[in-house]
Amino acid sequence: MDIPGETPGAPAETVTELQVRAVPGLTGIAASEWDACATSPETLSGGDETHNPFISHAFLSSLEESGCVSRKTGWLPLHVAVEREGRLVGVAPCYLKSHSQGEYVFDHGWADAYERAGGSYYPKLQVSVPFTPVTGPRFLIAPGSDVNEAASALVAGLRALRAETKASSIHVTFMQEREWEQAGALGFLQRIDQQFHWDNAGYGTFEDFLGALASRKRKAIRRERRDALGPGITIEHVTGADLTPAHWDAFYEFYADTGARKWGRPYLNRRFFKLLGERMPERVLLVMARREGRYVAGAINLIGDVALYGRNWGCVEDHPFLHFEVCYYQAIDFAIARGLKRVEAGAQGEHKLARGYRPVLMHSAHDIADPALRRAVADYLRREREHVIEAADVLGTLTPFRRETGECPASDLPEAPPEAKASAHATQKPKEKP
């Protein structure tokens, strides 16, 4: 690709010593090189995680090799790699997309408006982990490299790839806040959203966590847990070498049923889970519910060094509160036992508040080629940011913690940026949820 020394809407950057190329699949980058970038201090300096399993070569290559990510599914891999004298300096997981499904940062309204105005919104470039609403690094920088130089070169490469593929836009989603600030300085439009995470305040047991809650909320959770297991249901945690094809078969039945009902067809296939179990079993936790000798529900989580990431759930029998038990309370139990700092339970879900999860802001950045569409989206995002921050501010006062134990107060959330001080604007989002 031709990489300009100066990119539209961004400060001039000298990148003449760097070579940038688009790589059609992870087979074109050695796993050792990719993972060195994914785990370097330069990459991870924006967060507390020392290993994010979703950006590992094993996870992303499993998506590709299973066929979940491909031209056919509308996720064509075109990873952007920056090199100096044949050595990888930085890389971004990038996909050329023909739709907006499986992203969890919704731009359907932008696409519809642009198409009605006579434009072509697709293809677009998506820098993300497919089907995964989890914050993590998106600009992966090699150890010892200059972070700003590498990020600027990656952005220049993405813009060149956008022009080469005639894509309308670049979308970097669920990125670290530091990267979000970098992207903003390089001319990207900035967007925020929210999720609900559980924080471990040094609890030794689940009862210690309950002790931090208001009495009424504590009793409600105990009742939910009791009722969930009332019909003779038992819970198993399965990870590492204990994972068997039978576990994956049972879980995939749950997942496929949920995916078919929510999206028409599941995003992930059975082969993906097989590869995941082979390549990174120590990073997988299946929480499985059994009744009368048969698995009836389950959830998959991935284990980071400091966080547990809840992903997908499903069931073949409906039982009151079983979803909360399998997805939320068992995740908290596991995090406490492992000494993990938090649980991230996926996208959306204000019902998580009552179960000890608090609002946390998510970050994405968007670069749009058409000046008219860019102006319209920029105006929309100014109003949306204010609404999201105001909503998170209110939700932060509704956590179940006793006042003296530190529920998430409004002061813990950032103020709206100066340009966002416009009238609040509520937004409706499609119901796409893991």
Image (spheres, grey):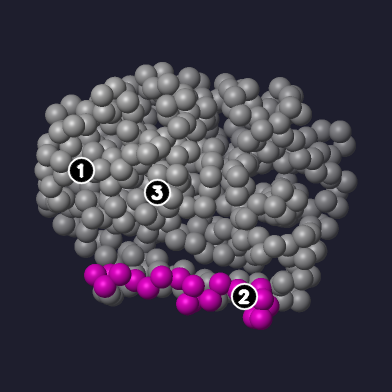
| Label 2: how many Cα within 10 Å (few below 14, some 14–19, many 20+) | few
Q: Residue at x 26, y 24 (%)?
A: 85
Q: Quadrant of the C terminus?
A: top right
Q: Read off the residue under disc 1.
A: 115
Asked if the residue at tag 2 contacts the one at tag 3, i.e. Cβ–Cβ closer than 8 Å, the answer is no
Mark nearer the viewer, 1 or 2:
2
Residue positioned most to the front? 144
Q: Read off the residue under disc 2.
A: 406
Q: Quick check: 89 left or right of 410?
A: left
Q: Read off the residue under disc 3.
A: 175
Q: Quadrant of the N terminus?
A: top left
Q: Residue at x 75, y 51 (%)?
A: 337
Q: Disc 3 to disc 2, how far (Cα)? A: 27 Å
User: Residue 375's image quarter?
Assistant: bottom left
Magenta range is 401-420
Q: Is residue 14 above or below residue 390?
A: above
